[in-house]
Image (cartoon, grey):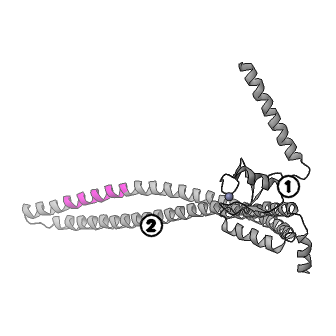
Amino acid sequence: MVTNNNEKLQELTIEEKLQNLYELQRVDSEINKIVTLRGELPLEVQDLEDELAGLSTRIENLKTELEELKKVTAQRNMDIKKAEDAIHKYSEQMQDVRNNRQYDALNKEVEFQNLEIELQRKRIGESLRVVKEKEILMEEAIRRYDEKHIDLDVKKGELNDIVNETHKEEETLRAKSQKLSAAIDDRLLFAYRRIRDNARNGLAVVTVDRDACGGCFNKIPPQRQLDIRSRKKIIVCEYCGRILIDKYICDYDGSQAQADLEASIELQKKKSRRSKREE
Ligand SMILES: [Zn+2]
């Protein structure tokens, strides 16, 4: 069955073979484009996820800092309580003193404890200010986290749709590629795939553009270009090994060639008008 098909395919003219090959190349390039595009899409989601992880760390750090500040403040309040107890104790002792020296000593202790209380209250006041600042920062971080999380959900949904869509498109193209491959004989198809695998841009069939190979951009001699245009044999680029075709090979109704011809005539006219004006 396959052999029969191959025999039938051998009967195709070189021109028909090249046309089939070029169509296949176009479809395969479309598939490559989709696969590349889909590979880049998850990066956006990745960026958002990284940002969320950063915000989450920030919130955790602020939480730890606030807890630490509260712990220190509680300790300072306890120190104040201790100082107040000491003052109370010294005041009682002062009532039983026997001389001025004892009285002065106790009085100094009370003064010292009062200074201690003052200092701790000042520090607690500073801490409370820092706590307020950090609480505002934390609220801000939580608000941004929530916002970004909504963004992420939306983006993920969008990307899922796009991925599903391109999967469908890719399947359609793959079916088309398979159908086109079946219209190319095994030997030529094998060569096409081998060249494609080795080519960085996945191009095995390229047109001649501005006298150069469309794959590696090396110049092609005029005689060789004539051979390519005659479509009588399969010609490969002597530099990169890609199969060379003329750009009108799939221009079945000649409309593209006609359009190019008209454009070049128009250009010619413009040039001559300009040179006349300049005379
Ligand atoms: Zn080349």
Return the residue nearer the eye: 227 or 191.
Answer: 227
Categorize mark 1 by other alpha carbons within 10 Å: few (<14), some (14-19), many (20+).
some
Residue 155 shows in the view: yes
- Secondary structure under badge 2? helix
- Residue at the location (83% across, 61% down)? 18
- Secondary structure under badge 1? loop
Q: Amino acid at mark 2?
A: Thr
Quadrant of the rendering where the C terminus is positioned:
top right
Task: Tell me which secondary structure the magenta stretch mostly adopts.
Answer: helix
Q: Quadrant of residue 250?
A: bottom right
- Residue at the location (49% across, 55% down)? 137
Q: Amino acid at mark 1?
A: Cys
Q: Position of residue 91 (x, y in %)?
A: 21, 64
- Residue at the location (46% across, 64% down)? 61
Magenta stretch encompasses residue 113: yes
Q: Position of residue 129 (x, y in %)?
A: 41, 53
Sooner in the amino-acid sequence: mark 2 or mark 1: 2
Q: Position of residue 241 (x, y in %)?
A: 69, 63
Q: Quadrant of residue 162?
A: bottom right
Numbered badge on residue 250 = 1
Measured along the vertical axis of the image, is residue 202 above or below residue 229?
Answer: below
Is residue 6 rendered to the left or right of residue 36? right
Q: Which residues are magenta?
A: 111-126
Which residue position is annotated with label 2?
Answer: 64
Quadrant of the rendering where the N terminus is positioned:
bottom right
Numbered badge on residue 6 = none
Q: CA distance from mark 2 to mark 1?
A: 69 Å
Is residue 141 rendered to the left or right of residue 151? left
